[in-house]
Image (tube, rainbow, N blue to C red):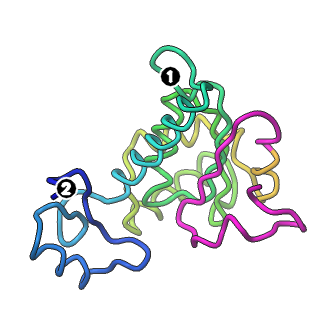
Amino acid sequence: ELRGEYIGRKNAGIGGSELRWMERATNFTIGNGCLRDTGDGTAHGVDSGMRTTLEYLGKASSGTQKMKGIPVPICGLGKVGFPLMQILHEDGAVVSIWEPALSGTSDADLDSFYEKAEGGGAAVEPGHLETLKALRKNIYSTEREALETTTSGTHFVCPASSRIEWLTEKVNGQLRYE
C-alpha cells in the first residue's frame, strides 16, 4: 500500500485504458480527465531527481539554489520542458535550450512559439515566456551546439518530449551521454 507515495499517470506504455484499470484500485492517478497537467508533476520530479543526485555527489550548492551554476541543456520545450526550464532557471541552473520547432530568438519568434505550444496543450504559463526570453542567448539552433555547452563538470541532459532511446543514439558519431 503506497498511500499516494506514487501517483500513476500517462507515460510511455501507460495510456488511458491502463489508468482506468489503476483507478479501480486507487485514487492516486493523474492525467485521465483531471484538471492538473501532468507536465508540471514530471518537471518537479526531474528537478527533485537532479537535486538529490547533486546532494548525493556532494556537488549541490549551499543555500536555496541547489542547482546554482550546473549546466542543464533541455532538448525540447513542451508539456515538461517549459515548467522544467522555469524550475531550473529559478534554482540557479545554467539552462540551455534546443528546440527544433523554434525558428529564431527574436521576440516575435519566441511569442509565436509560445502561442503554438500553448495551443497544443503544453503546460505553459506567462512566466515561462518571460524566462524563455531571458534565456534567449542560451537557445541553440542545433542539438550539437546545445550539448557542447556542457563540456565540463557535472551536467544533466533532459531529453524532454523524446523517446527513451534518445540518450543512447549518436550525434556526429558521439553518444549523447557516456
Q: Which residue is mark 2?
A: 2
Q: Which of pointers 2 and 1 lies earlier in the amino acid sequence?
A: 2
Q: Is residue 159 magenta?
A: yes
Instruction: Report which residue position mark 1 lands on.
Output: 65
Q: Residue at x 13, y 73 (%)?
A: 23
Q: Secondary structure at mark 1?
A: loop
- Left or right of 173, for residue 39: left
Q: Where is 1 relative to 130, above or below? A: below
Q: Residue furthest right?
A: 173
161 up-or-down from 81: above or below: below
* Magenta stretch: includes residue 128: no
| Residue 117 point in image, percent of width and height | 46, 62
Q: What amino acid type should be assigned to the residue bearing mark 1?
A: Gln
Marks 1 and 2: in contact by CB < 8 Å? no
What amino acid type should be assigned to the residue bearing mark 2? Leu
- Specify the segment rendered in magenta: 149-178
Which quadrant is the N terminus positioned in?
bottom left
Labelled disc at residue 41: none
In the rendered image, the residue lying farthest to the front is: 1
Q: Nearer the viewer, residue 157 or 52?
A: 52
Q: Where in the figure is residue 70, as x and y percent of width and height?
A: 65, 32
Residue 127 is situated, as x and y percent measured from the top left of the image, at: 41, 39
* Nearer to me, 123 or 65: 65
- Residue at image point 39% right, 66% down: 119
Q: Is residue 55 left or right of residue 143?
A: left
With respect to residue 128, does 29 lie above or below?
Answer: below
Q: Quadrant of the C terminus?
A: bottom right
